[in-house]
Image (cartoon, rainbow, N blue to C red):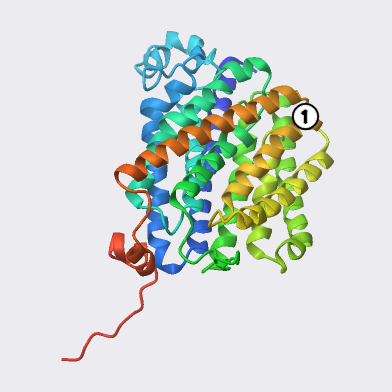
Amino acid sequence: MDGETQFVLNTFSFLFWGALVMWMCAGFTMLEAGSVRTKNASVVCLKNVGLYAIAGLTFYLVGYNIMFAGVEETGFLGYGANGLERSLLAGDASSAAPVTAHGHSSMSHWFFQMVFVGSTASIVSGTLAERVRLSSFFVFIVVLTAVIYPVVGAWTWGGGWLARMGFQDFAGSTVVHSTGGWAALAGALVVGARSGKFGADGSVKITPPSNVPAVTLGVFIIWLGFLGFNGGSQAALSGVVDALTISNVIVNTNLAASAGVLVAVTFSRQVFGRTDLLAVLNGAIGGLMAITAGPAIVDPYWAIAIGGIGGGVTMIGMKILMLLKIDDEVGAISAHMGAGIWGTLAACIAAGADLVAQTVGIVAIGIFAFGVSIVTWKVIDWTIGARIGPDVEVMGQDVAELGIEAFPEFVPAPED
């Protein structure tokens, strides 16, 4: 394959898979909006649109350069197309060969990496729904997307010390999802639980989704987006090997999610005393998280085993958080952090990862992400306040913070 064709295919691959990953933000929005009470659904929509916009700008201005500062071929340190690409865009045909030698356009690589950042931020949004102050949430997302995530990425995908140690994470079980899970856990500890969620006697108030079809649709959208999340992480589409690898990755991703669902269907009654729909849907997400560290495995039966265990880890994690009285509105900590950690370790079983390197990576990233996150949340709480007031919690954030309702009743106009 000639260099120009390879360049075009690789660039198109980043842009296409990146668009699918962006679509996951819509899935997280639907999942979260359907999980909360209707009086908070509008704020959920604003949070998710806002966090994606923040992620795009902060990762463009700061984060990408932190993450890939040591990787010269990214060519993005000038905040746009690199010098050779600019020459070609300006009509200098002599630049075509040097540009295609890079394998893909710098902007397509930036876009694909940026949409991952939005997924990390969405994890925090789901966990803290219905009680975090909107402005405080956005302040934290700036820190997460500009500093916390990029530093973790620099250690791993940016060629840093964990990469040199041999740490492997194909598409981000730990780099993306555990990082978001640790940040969400820190926020949950600082902000606290929703009023009335946990009784003094240890009881847990069940808070079922307000819109079950929306939650289910959200999970399907996330499932679809993960095909791009993992498939695109092959980072090339330039030959037979890439095509075969992407095919395996997509099939293994789908199998892992399916196994996570069936494990949750089978065992949720034993864990929660009922066949729990939210647990089943999170079983799919847990399966996706688990396989993400090593989806390029050749034998699909390993994907089924890894995904099934990921679904089980997610359910058990949800139960443990309830016992610890840590309120996670959508089960994101268990699905993203818990199953993400399992998946990173499971890469040692079938994907050739080194147990020592994987363990060091999990611990180092966990300490850093949680440590910086909890300090950030505490500073936010001490300054502008992290939690909404009790009157706002009763009234609902939609009316109190936005002055609208997500599902207003139609009231007849008064007669003259």
Image vertical order of residue 118 relative to residue 150, above or below: below
Instruction: Provide residue 102's location: percent of width, then percent of height.
Output: 53, 15
- From the viewer's side, name the closer residue of 399 and 214: 399
Instruction: Provide residue 178's location: percent of width, then percent of height.
Output: 59, 38
- From the viewer's side, name the closer residue of 348 and 304: 348
> Residue 376, located in which quarter of the rendered image?
top left
Q: Kindly tell me whether residue 353 is visible in this rendering.
A: no
Q: Please tell me whether mark 1 sits on a helix, a strand or a loop.
A: helix
Q: Residue at x 57, y 60 (%)?
A: 217
Q: Viewed as shown, does residue 203 lie left or right of 74?
A: right
Quarter of the rendering occupied by the N terminus = top right
Residue bearing the label numbered 1: 348
Q: Amino acid at mark 1?
A: Cys
Q: Residue at x 77, y 57 (%)?
A: 262
Q: Residue at x 75, y 65 (%)?
A: 269
Q: Badge 1: how crowded within 10 Å, few (<14), some, or many (20+)?
A: some
